[in-house]
Image (cartoon, grey):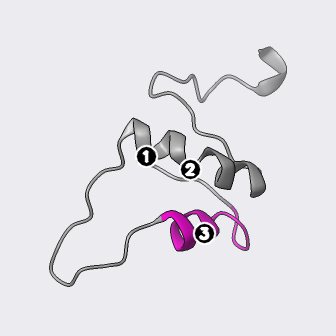
């Protein structure tokens, strides 16, 4: 997962929705189900999940 956010907002996703760190262990990738379960939290911080095939070069005005 790649996350783009500005300081002072998006980190709430990881603080409230993330896992507690375990020393010497890599975190598991988040599943689609977990991402969908975080939608209410994402809405409160004005973030959205994009599909893997999202065209990130396309501006919102072109949609």
| Between discs 3 and 2, the one toward the N terminus | 3
**Residue furthest top as drawn:** 63
CA separation in Å, label 3 and label 1 = 17 Å
**Residue range (magenta):** 6-17
CA separation in Å, label 3 and label 2 = 13 Å
**Where residue 32 sits in the image (x, y, percent)?**
41, 36
**Where residue 45 sits in the image (x, y, percent)?**
74, 58
Res 34 label: 1
CA separation in Å, label 1 and label 2 = 6 Å
Q: Are marks 1 and 2 in contact (CB under 8 Å)?
A: yes
| SS type, badge 1 | helix
Q: In which quarter of the image is the C terminus?
A: top right
Give the camera-side residue of 3 and 20: 20
| Between discs 3 and 1, the one toward the N terminus | 3
Give the camera-side residue of 55 and 34: 34
Foreground tag (3 vs 1): 1
Q: In this view, does 15 lie above or below 55?
A: below
Q: In this view, does 36 lie above or below 38?
A: above
**Which residue is identified by label 3?**
11
**Which residue is identified by label 2?**
38
Q: Which residue: 54% across, 24% down?
A: 54
């Amino acid at each position: 997962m790649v996350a783009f956010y500005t300081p002072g907002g998006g980190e709430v996703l990881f603080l409230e929705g993330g896992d507690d760190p375990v020393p010497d262990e890599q975190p598991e990738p988040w599943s689609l189900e977990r991402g969908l379960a975080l939608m209410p939290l994402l809405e409160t911080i004005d973030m959205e999940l994009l599909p893997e095939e999202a065209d990130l070069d396309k501006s919102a005005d072109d949609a």
